[in-house]
Amino acid sequence: MDDGRFKVISANAFGYMASGDRLDYFNGQCDTASLQVTTDRRLTVRIGRWSADRMEWVQTVERASAKPLIYMVHQLKPNVTYRVVVAGRVNGNMRSDAKGDLVVGLPARDARILIQKPSF
């Protein structure tokens, strides 16, 4: 899928909706967005593995910027700590809210993103 502003690539079935500065990605046959991203940049998102415990994608940004991309990851386990890894480096641990949502601002540059439930 490529609408000139956003491009989504996945080996699996998915849906999407793009409006203004926001892209919604729907994993498989989900009727609720699995991932939302807000940015003023042209963005390609290549989806990798996607499950409740581990979400992977590669973001490619037309031009790097100091202004972060704002992601909202949905359908996570509620009130659970997830590790955020950007380009192979741990960016920190974040906790999903009571609805199973997690909001994270990530650098607007090309990077592989991994959000996973750590095994303590």
Image: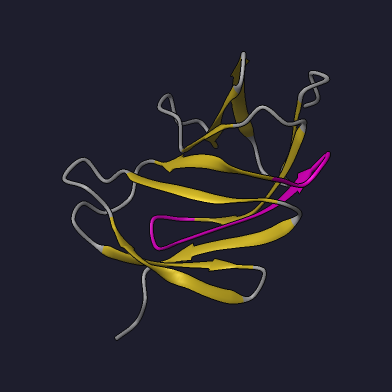
Quarter placement of the C terminus: bottom left
Vertical side of 53 occupied by 22: above or below: above
Quarter of the image for the N terminus: give it.
Answer: top right
Q: What residue sits 76% from the left and 54% below the top? A: 110
The magenta span reads 51-65
Q: Position of residue 112 (x, y in %)?
A: 68, 61
119 vs 62, left or right, is left
Q: Position of residue 57 (x, y in %)?
A: 64, 54
Residue at image position (54%, 69%) is: 85
Camera-side residue of 39 and 112: 39
Whether 62 is among the magenta residues is: yes
Q: Quadrant of residue 52?
A: bottom left
Residue 2, horizontal then vertical, whole percent: 81, 25
- The location of residue 13, given as percent across then percent down, is 64, 36
Residue at figure coordinates x 67%, y 69% from the top left: 87
Say above or below: 79 vs 86: above
> Image quarter for residue 20?
top right
Q: Is residue 65 above or below residue 25?
A: below
Specify the farthest residue to the front: 66
